[in-house]
Amino acid sequence: MRTAEISRCGWSEENDLLRKYHDSEWGVPLHDDRRLFEFLVLDAFQAGLSWSIILKKRYGFRRAFDHFDPEKIARYGPKRIEKLLQEAAIIRNRMKIEATVENAKAFLEIQDQFGSFDSFIWQFVRGKPITHRYRYLKDLPTHTRESDKMSQVLKEQGFKFVGSTICYAFMQAAGMVNDHLTHCFRHSQICAGQAGAQRTRRGWRPHEG
């Protein structure tokens, strides 16, 4: 019996790595602080590059940046930064590397203030994923009022490389928005997962200011 062809978002068909990421991670609501920090770092490094390049270097980034442990990264000094600039397994961009160290410090401050980064970052969608119903890739926005606000507040908190476009890419990756196209098999799966969970976001509170 012939298996029916699976319909995916067109951007994911470039290679197997993108397909695997699309099928298992992209758009899935994420609430683990370490993983959220990882995506925040990777999306900053993606600026000006393709996501495919970042995925190919993802494990290199994990090794080089202590598996995205913000407490360790926040302590990186000039010698560690110079060492990272010689690391071929990552994107060797001084501004982005230095921004990662500053972002780790800001991330820890957010955790202290809000209890978790998860509680802080999900406020921008009021604790619940936004489901879009786009039919074509060209219809996907590069930023929204939610990502504009996220960018503004993150900058106020001391984060760098967090423009609205980067923030929206982060929202897509972390499942704060479901931007799978309506014909994609993952769109309905993620919607079903959200409906099945029906859980209250503990610790969520809106940002004041």
Image (cartoon, rainbow, N blue to C red):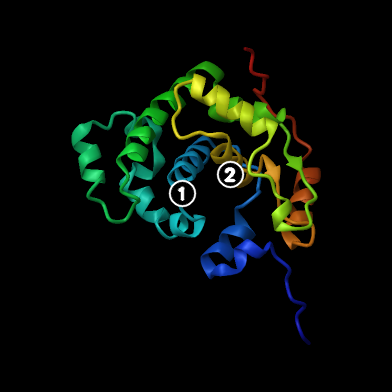
Secondary element type, mark 1: loop
CA–CA distance between discs 2 and 1? 13 Å
Q: Residues within 10 Å of mark 2 (few under 14, many from 20)?
A: many
Location of mark 1 (residue): 48
Disc 2 vs disc 1: Cβ atoms closer than 8 Å? no
**Residue 73 versus residue 82: which sits nearer the camera?**
82
Relative vertical location of residue 137 with respect to residue 69 in this rendering, above or below = below
Residue found farthest to the top: 209
Q: Position of residue 188 (x, y in %)?
A: 79, 55
Q: Hey, which residue is sitting farthest bottom in the picture?
A: 1
Image spot of residue 123 (x, y percent): 66, 26
Q: Earlier in the sequence, mark 2 or mark 1?
A: 1
**Residue 104 against residue 157 in the figure, above or below:** below
Where is residue 107 shown, x and y percent of the image? 46, 27
Residue type, numbered disc 1: Gly
Look at the image and tell me in which quarter the C terminus lies: top right
Give x and y (percent) for residue 31: 60, 37
| Residue receiving disc 2 | 169
Residue found 18% across the figure and 36% down from its top: 79
Q: Residues within 10 Å of mark 1 (few under 14, many from 20)?
A: few
> Where the N terminus falls, by quadrant?
bottom right
Locate residue 156 relative to residue 81 in the image: left or right: right
Residue shown at 52% from the left, 25% from the top: 154
Along the viewing direction, whichever of 97 and 109 lies nearer the viewer: 97
Q: Residue at x 77, y 46 (%)?
A: 132
Closer mark to the observer between disc 2 and disc 1: 1
The amino acid type found where label 2 is placed reads: Ala
Residue 166 falls in image quadrant: top right
Q: Which mark is residue 128?
A: none
Badge 2 marks a residue whose secondary structure is helix
